Image (spheres, helix red, strand yellow):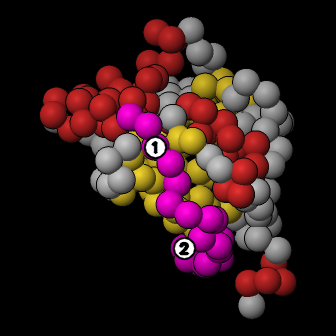
Amino acid sequence: MDAEIAAVDEWLADEKTLSGPFPGWGKSYGRDHTSRWGIVDSIRTQRGELAITCDRALIKPTICVLMERKLVFRLDIVPENESEPNDFGALAFGLPGMVKGSHIHSWVHNREWVKVHGFGELPIREPTPKALKTLEQALATTADVVGITLTTEQRDCRLPAERDLF
């Protein structure tokens, strides 16, 4: 497990870009809209991907960062009045016991939890620095936290128009 944790640390510290323009939307998991976008590291190897999911109502997008299919980051856009309890481990980082609105599950806050419990979940939440309302804002925040350089074209990432999916 230590080697896997170290590999994630190294990958997150590396310079990364996204592979090409936004790949578009598809449907899976019932009615959710999904998109998968490759993440390329400094030696031009694609070891990661952005997995973007949004509910059918287009109000709760989630961006997950996976490295070799392991969840290492997640950002959830949720209504400002929605609250979720935080994991007890959040106290060690000075994070609130209850998180309102959009939030981030960062590697920095969840690394030790993953080290003990394994990959799959990132239970510690951090409120986003500002109320994120658009997918473009969420993508920019994700790129900043995870160290992905975005092109101007890649920053223009929008939720699907329902009529475009059929």
The residue that disc 2 covers is 29
Image-based side of 122 in relation to 81, left or right = left
Task: For residue 77, say whether it is visible.
Answer: no
Q: Residues within 10 Å of mark 1 (few under 14, many from 20)?
A: many
Q: Residue at x 59, y 15 (%)?
A: 95
Helix, strand or loop at mark 1? strand
Q: In the depicted view, which residue is nearer to us: 36 or 87?
A: 36
Query: In this picture, is 39 found above or below 126?
Result: below
Q: Quadrant of the N terminus?
A: top left
* Residue range (magenta): 14-33
Query: In this picture, is 44 found above or below 83?
Result: below
The residue that disc 1 covers is 16
Q: Which amino acid type corresponds to the residue marked 2 in the rendered image?
A: Tyr
Instruction: Please tell me whether mark 2 or mark 1 is closer to you in this view.
Output: 1
Distance between mark 2 and mark 1 Cα atoms:
28 Å
Helix, strand or loop at mark 2? loop
Residue 43, horizontal then vertical, whole percent: 32, 47
